[in-house]
Amino acid sequence: MSNLSLYQLSNNYLEALDFLTDPEADLPIEAVNDTLEALGGELEDKAINVAKFMRNMEATAEAIKAAEADMAKRRKALESRVKWLKDYLKGNMEACGISKIECPFFKIAIQANPAAVNILDESSIPEQFKEQVITWKIDKTAIKDAIKAGKIVPGAELVNGTRLAIR
């Protein structure tokens, strides 16, 4: 396990849970249940060890998420710099009247883009070129409030589920 470990687990649980939760292993849930059952111990001990392992996985996931955010930020900065350099090079080539530069590694050329439509006044466009798009968003909070207030909302109901809380 990495240095992100928040809790110490027994070796049996650690090895089993690490293997069972490997996303690349793609084990059926029955195999996971059977292995956990074979580890022995009381339900409370199993629950504590599984919760410890979950906390370790959550910490690893958070570290990955932070790394992804850092990488995305760096990628966007690089993409922005590339765009700036492209525009800089294109602008200077056009200003100097140069349309092509060749070297042993690549060829740089100013090329014409295909024709693109530029809309000057959307309201002047004939109806035959317009497509109506309608979207709906269901306001679940308003539905919940209405049902709690005693109103019947066709197609909706309030349900109470359960969740696992680890504090």
Image: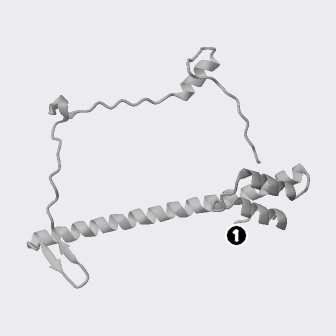
- Tag 1: amino acid: Ser
In the orientation shown, which residue stands out farthest toward the left? 97
Residue 51 visible in the current orientation:
no
Q: Report which residue position mark 1 lands on.
A: 2
Quarter holding residue 3: bottom right
Question: On the picture, is 63 further left or further right than 71?
Answer: right
Please give left or right for residue 80 compared with residue 102 in the image. right
Q: Residue furthest bottom?
A: 104
Image position, residue 14 (x, y; %)? 79, 64
Q: Position of residue 12 (x, y in %)?
A: 84, 65
Q: Position of residue 97 (x, y in %)?
A: 8, 72
Q: Mark 1 packing: few (<14 Cα in 10 Å), some, or many (20+)?
A: few
Give percent across and percent down for residue 84.
28, 66
Q: Nearer the viewer, residue 119 or 20?
A: 20
In this picture, is 3 found above or below 53?
below
Viewport quadrant of the N terminus: bottom right
How many marks overall? 1
Q: Judge whether residue 82 can be spotted in this image.
A: yes
Locate residue 8 relative to residue 160 in the image: left or right.
right
Q: Where 12 falls versus 44 (above or below)?
A: below
Of residue 86 and residue 100, the one placed in the foreground of this image is 100
Colour scheme of the rendered structure: one colour
Location of residue 122 by image quarter: top left
Q: Secondary structure at mark 1?
A: loop
Look at 82% across and 62% down and name the residue there: 13
Residue drawn at 14 percent across, 61 percent down: 112
Q: Residue 79: which quarter of the image? A: bottom left
Residue placed farthest to the top in the image? 151
Residue shown at 76%/58% (left/top)?
53
